[in-house]
Structure formats: structure tokens, C-alpha cells
Image (tube, grey):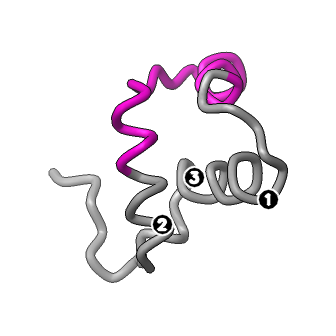
Amino acid sequence: MSLHNPEKPMNSDLITRILDKYFIKKGKTLEVIQRYLSVRYKLIMDKKVLQKRIENLSSN
């Protein structure tokens, strides 16, 4: 079973919304976002993955 839903645009997922709100709009660092995701959602995200998501978000 795949968790990927092709009908949902990328901008609607949790990580993209958090990156948009905290990195782009509030100017938080990736380290702060990594800590927030870890504490709040128990998600461990590599910094390179977050950077790639930001690049994708910026290009759209």
C-alpha cells in the first residue's frame, strides 16, 4: 500500500505546510524546523531532504 496520493498536490502535505509557514514566512532555520518536527510529530527529517523540499516549493 502506497502512502503517496497523486491526486493531492505537494503543497497540501504536512512538511510542505510547515516549511512554508516557518521557513519561508517566519524565517526559522532548518535546525529549528527539524527540532519542531521531531518533538511535535516524532518525525526525523534529514536536512538535505528539507532543503530539497524547499527548492521544490520555491520552484512551484
Residue lying furthest left: 1
**Residue 51 appears left or right of 42:** left
Of labels 3 and 1, the one closer to you: 1
* 40 or 48, nearer to the observer: 48
Question: Residue tagged by mark 2?
Answer: 57
Numbered badge on residue 25 = 1
Residue 25 location (% of width, % of height): 79, 59
Camera-nearest residue between 58 and 15: 58
Q: Name the residue type under label 1.
A: Lys
Q: Position of residue 20 (x, y in %)?
A: 66, 59
11 or 24, nearer to the observer? 24
Q: Amino acid at mark 3?
A: Leu
What residue appears at the point 35 percent right and 48 percent down from the top-left corner? 52
- What residue is shown at x 43% (from left), y 43% (from top)? 51
- The residue range painted magenta reads 32-52
Residue 7 found in image quarter: bottom left
Sequence order check, earlier mark of 3 and 1: 3
**Alpha carbons under labels 3 and 1: distance apart:** 16 Å
Looking at numbered disc 2 in the image, what kind of residue is underneath it? Leu
Label 2's element? Answer: helix
Residue 14 is marked as: 3
